[in-house]
Image (cartoon, coloured by chain):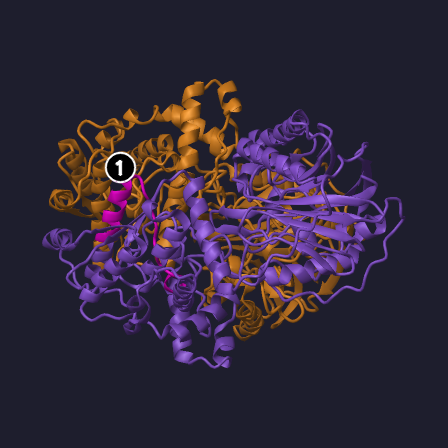
Chain colours: A purple, B orange
Amino acid sequence: MPTLRIALAQVNSTVGDIAGNATSVRRWCRSAAEAGAQIVAFPEMMLTGYPIEDLVFRDSFVAASQQAIRQLAADLATDGLGDLAVVLGYVDADGPAPTSSAALPGCGRRNASALLFDGEIKATYYKHHLPNYGVFDEDRYFEQGRSLTVVRFGGVDIGLTVCEDLWQAGGPFTAACRAGVGLVVHINASPYELNKDDIRLPLVKRRAAEAGATVAYVNLIGGQDELVFDGDSMIVTSGGELLARAGQFTEELLVHDLDLPVAGKSANEPGPAPEPPARSSEAIDGEIRADEDMEIVRVAADAEPRPTTGGRADGGIAHRITDEEEIWSALTLGLRDYVEKNGFRSVVFGLSGGIDSAVVAAIAVDALGRERVTAVSMPSGYSSAHSRDDAADLAKRTGLDYRVEPIQAMVDAFLANLSLSGLAVENLQARVRGVILMALSNQEGHLVLTTGNKSELAVGYSTLYGDSVGGFNPLKDVPKTLVWKLARWRNADAARRGAEPPIPENSIVKPPSAELRPGQVDTDSLPDYEVLDAILTGYIDNDLGRNDLVAAGHDPALVDRVLRMVDVAEYKRRQSAPGTKISIKAFGRDRRLPITNRFREGT
Amino acid sequence: MPTLRIALAQVNSTVGDIAGNATSVRRWCRSAAEAGAQIVAFPEMMLTGYPIEDLVFRDSFVAASQQAIRQLAADLATDGLGDLAVVLGYVDADGPAPTSSAALPGCGRRNASALLFDGEIKATYYKHHLPNYGVFDEDRYFEQGRSLTVVRFGGVDIGLTVCEDLWQAGGPFTAACRAGVGLVVHINASPYELNKDDIRLPLVKRRAAEAGATVAYVNLIGGQDELVFDGDSMIVTSGGELLARAGQFTEELLVHDLDLPVAGKSANEPGPAPEPPARSSEAIDGEIRADEDMEIVRVAADAEPRPTTGGRADGGIAHRITDEEEIWSALTLGLRDYVEKNGFRSVVFGLSGGIDSAVVAAIAVDALGRERVTAVSMPSGYSSAHSRDDAADLAKRTGLDYRVEPIQAMVDAFLANLSLSGLAVENLQARVRGVILMALSNQEGHLVLTTGNKSELAVGYSTLYGDSVGGFNPLKDVPKTLVWKLARWRNADAARRGAEPPIPENSIVKPPSAELRPGQVDTDSLPDYEVLDAILTGYIDNDLGRNDLVAAGHDPALVDRVLRMVDVAEYKRRQSAPGTKISIKAFGRDRRLPITNRFREGT
């Protein structure tokens, strides 16, 4: 029974930075070799970043990817790593690249996994199942692979698969069973959402049983616009044993020795498949696409793997973190990568003393360090003393750069020149604040953060071009009730570590208010957030209709009012900043609704 | 040889307004009956509007559509029109509707065409080819139909097909040939883009030849967010003869008598297929999807059509309009429908005296009438006298509501409180104007129009939350050079009609300037627009890379500079207002690029 030392390189990559990503692969390959690994696997589309969206239509981009993977194979040999098998994802095209995306949408473009060895691309596999739901548009971009690639390496037959292949029944894992592979190297760019990690393990077990082979699952980490990838790489045997598992949200090289069946069997014995796990926004199992018999293409790496070193490697099983820590990690990593990958040095935002901006402040300081965070208190005549105190208190606790810019003089200049009343005056204050933040951004180079939560964004409880200004919104997919929960968790976590809780207790416990008119509180316009969030989760995350929500016990008149607010706020969301997806359905690419839409539930 | 009088109802519908759309169908059916029609065809998704996007995931929406089509069949019988065959599109689902879009993306949802007769749904066809490129996401939404429905009615076998079925070779038109149909009733929601009408006729001829049957093509008109549908309905024989053709951008009932082969043939003789036409953003012909043998399902309407009245009906062939008139019609209809379908009474925008806002003013007055249009001149210390004069001149020519709101006092209030210089001061002026327009919108209920053209949007030559504020942008997909061309055309057209040319000659001929600092002109920052637009068309519309553009004769350093500007402005476009698509690739749903993207062409 051959033993193979595998390294799963759970690493970050950046969309479009092909040269930088290739450099990262070479660096991690050196680490893998130093750890005695004989094969190392990187995530889906490691070389190009993921998702590349319409970049795939540009011939120059696809050609750069194809050129870079050949160069990488050669460079690894030059690095003395030609005897290390390297599996990684990139975008490929078969035949001459089409000259126009419009004439040939997605035609010939492939979401590919390559095995590099001995200075060459020894094998290539094209992703079979293409996700085209939620945030994914892969039917738009790629042509489906129709064959399973099996590479003989170190006496083991290894099948190559990519991401969605795991989420659908049949196809490559069934083919892997027929092919009698000893190992499936499964590369992923699977975005984080709450509870998805609880689904991945049973799903990997299910496919490992189906294939009758050990599955090595490696996932990307890092932020890309509205997505954040959480890692959670793992190795599972055909019998369902979890051999090793990496942590979430950190770069990590998971190195493990695998005793694998010798190559040459005609077929595997599939194990008893565990039940499919609960749903996430990635579709599960082949209710969707029919199973099919894929062709099996066999290639040989044609040489021995490098010898391993040291004793037996055990990757270990990382401890699982709580939901709150998971979300906090997602939000900090999502923000940090947006800032750094887009070349910003620092961020700025309005600090009102309320809970949303307080939590954004804590996230920003955790993500970037206090010296890169500027918060601006912009009090008006309607701002309460406690708001200013709470903002100042937070600034003291976190040590961020804190400034005060009263807005009344600027508001008055508008009021003196325009005849405004009511809502127009409320919105004016928010817009003056927006102008101040954008001016500071222009003058000092900060990225502006906007601090609206998912509940506000859902019902349109914000001022367009006012408090909604900003290039990124850390709370975009965080409902108000969860904002409070995260605040409490972050403070408690600090207390546990003997550190200063960053968020003033008063910001957590006081009734939320926009403070745009005297004595205003959110509950003037909105139901209690516990009630509101329950309705919103049903309507947005689960596509429930009015009658379903009423049947679930909600007040019919309230349901009608909330649904109407959500429907008519679509135009605001269409112009909103991106923010990290953490739920099963986030505003953005994930949820695509018309602005012009007269459908009213229950009427 | 039976004669059938067909009416093609080229009409408007509104997304989500199922009741209103059904009422419209009944009204047009009465008109069709009055014209002696025996069969009337409405566009794709007439009942629900198109595109409905993620509304399809809501069971309540799909159920409302299913309920409404049954009710419509009954209501038509009540109206005394049970003996009129009515073909129209709606969203259907087979089997119990799935309870979650995430678990079953698009599963069981159908883009359907129904034939109503005698108070019932006599036949249903499910769209076979689902477009999933450009603005279309139909693989996300619908399950593919696998059979062709053939209805025997008035002694003729009629095949039902939907939109994209025409754009792909094989599938239902081939099946229609095998089935020996006499007529294909082909319903569409095919969005306008420049030159697409020149492609449709040869394409309809090609499919008519393939089917060996007459094809009656009916298309939607009207605006829906970023799309506008132009009609251009037509009837073409298997031999390629154009029998009748409607105009573009207007509601119209095209009534024509067709002499059709008697039902019962086993197969048709396909004609010699003309060459496929040039490309548009809709993919053409089956380079993409393989042909397949579809099952043929035959039903009979089971009764005689109502008798016709009067002499022989000839729908005639509408005269073709120029490109400029076509685009102007698209922009006015797109704006009017956005305003009306979203319940606005009026629009407001900044009128600078420059060409962009002048053209927006002319479009708005043409779309809505001058009494619904407010334009605001917002001069600063840097605004030239000619700018103010040109704005006032336009106001006089068009008769719109014109106001002057100088911005300096408000700008000064910010400058007194913040330390700003350079670009921050320039952007501040634009943002003060944005605040004024939004205040007027809040106070008076206008929809704010933003006036940036496609060239500006491409290179980011605008101020986020400044001149970019607004709910709709009529020029979003109009490059600067085309803005000038449209202005000249509109003035010349007015002169031809003996009317007042709306746009001051000076706005057309003067060098464009943002007037945010003394003596500023666009060419300080940008190349001549003729050069810029040529590069942008290559890069954006045609996905050319840097080397392709250099090979086409553009200056390499300039190409690098322009491409870099386009790449880094993605974050601004992501927050931009919707606007009518007129090109092969518009910003919006049509072009999906990551914000975080380090790919730099040619480096």
Tell me if residue B124 comes above or below residue B534 in the rendering: below
For residue A198, what is the image quadrant? Answer: bottom right
**What residue sits 52% from the left and 34% below the top?**
A17
Q: Position of residue A128 (x, y in %)?
A: 71, 47
Q: Nearer the viewer, residue B104 or B542?
A: B104
On the rendered structure, is B138 left or right of B238? left
Asked whether residue A45 is in view, the answer is: yes
For residue B7, what is the image quadrant? Answer: bottom right
Tell me if residue B322 comes above or below residue A573 in the rendering: above
**What residue sits 60% from the left and 36% below the top?**
A25
Tell me if residue B570 comes above or below residue A412 in the rendering: above
Hey, what amino acid is under mark 1? Gly
Asked whether residue B180 is in view, the answer is: no
Say what secondary structure mark 1 lies in: loop
**What residue sits 39% from the left and 77% below the top?**
A558
Report if residue A456 lies within the magenta region. yes
On the rendered structure, is B435 left or right of B324? left
Residue at the front extreme of this rendering: A310
Q: Nearer the viewer, residue A406 or A488?
A: A488
Report if residue B124 lies within the magenta region. no
Q: Position of residue A433 (x, y in %)?
A: 23, 52
On the rendered structure, is A176 left or right of B217? right
Within 10 Å of the Cα at label 1, are there few (<14), some (14-19), or many (20+) other Cα atoms?
A: few
Chain ID, mark 1: B
Q: Magenta segment, which residues?
A: A432-458
Q: Which residue is mark 1?
A: B498
Q: Position of residue B439 (x, y in %)?
A: 21, 55
Tell me if residue A257 comes above or below residue A598 in the rendering: above
Q: Nearer the viewer, residue A242 or A95?
A: A242
Main secondary structure along the magenta-highlighted residues: helix
Q: Position of residue A76 (x, y in %)?
A: 66, 29
